[in-house]
Amino acid sequence: MRSLTLGPSLTVSPTSSLMKQPPPFFPPPPPPRVPHDSSVSKLGSCRATQFVDLFPAVSPEIVVREARLEDSWEVAETHCSSFFPGYSFPLDFMLRVNRLVGMLSGFSIPTGCRRTCLIAVIGGSVDMFLIGAEEFKVGGFDGRFSLSKGYVAGILTIDTVADFLPRKGPLRERRTGIAYVSNVAVRERFRRKGIAKRLMAKAEAQARSWGCRAIALHCDSNNPGATKLYKDLGFRCIKVPEGADWPQPKTARDVRFTFMMKLLNTPTTT
């Protein structure tokens, strides 16, 4: 005859004496309620990338600010590890030193133009204790020092020099009122955490504070992720007129760029 299974090890047949007095029924406790967007995995463990969602007060905060002189080596490291990941010692070290020297000495800009380096910092980024004069600048870096520096996870450069914007008129005059973004880079282990979006938001705010009416950049045409990010932020692809000699970033010859621009809603004066 057919048997009924009660649990993993107890089997009761219709002739068993237990059928005469069924045991009391205790319903199992309901499973713990887990929100739809919970960061707890099905195995009951918390993965490293989910720790911030579960314990935001313990996890390091990400703050975007202007780079200071003390951040210069990490800025160079972030740049080289993102754009030249295939290099190994000693070439990678030499590349970082070259980039560092270039940033510190090559930030000379024409009169009336501006340039600054923005960084995304993780941990210890509250600017409560800054040492030095606010006007002290070294290249594009703030010359002050902080007692709570933090760790550089992403970088971005923004300027109004217009080196990579098409010149205007027969005299090829430098364009004004357009901020240009370059060297957007995030360290590999911190990607897909919204850091690039935070950097771009800060760059737009910086451009508005400079009175710019638009912000532009060049995006690698073979990087669909970056292209989607910029489009989601409101950038539009600008078609280069046929035969036009528009400047482009100096990289490998096989790299193709898409020129993108976004209009800024700057307050108007009456």
Image (cartoon, rainbow, N blue to C red):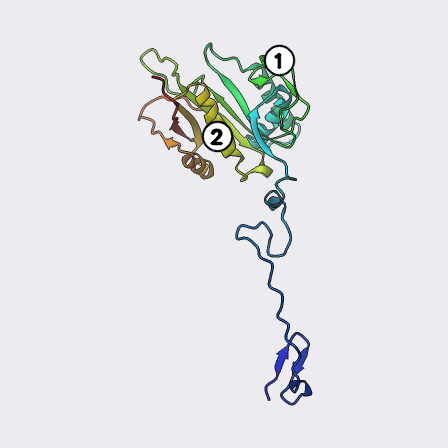
Q: Which of these two is toward me, 69 or 248?
A: 69
Instruction: Identify the residue at horizontal 64%, vertical 21% (top origin).
Output: 70
Q: Which residue is mark 2?
A: 201
Q: Is residue 3 above or below residue 174?
A: below
Q: Which of these two is toward me, 227 or 197?
A: 197
Instruction: Identify the residue at horizontal 46%, vertical 14% (top origin).
Output: 113
Q: Which residue is mark 1?
A: 133
Instruction: Identify the residue at horizontal 64%, vertical 14% (top origin).
Output: 132
Q: Which of these two is toward me, 238 or 264?
A: 264
Q: Is residue 177 left or right of residue 118?
A: left
- Find the distance from the CA under tag 2 to the CA under tag 1: 27 Å
Label 2: how many Cα within 10 Å (few below 14, some 14–19, many 20+):
some
Label 1 sits on a secondary structure element that is: loop
Q: Quadrant of residue 97?
A: top right
Residue 250 in view (yes/no)? no
Question: In what quadrant of the picture does the N terminus appear?
Answer: bottom right
Circle on res. 14: none
Q: Amino acid at mark 2?
A: Ala
Label 1: how many Cα within 10 Å (few below 14, some 14–19, many 20+):
few
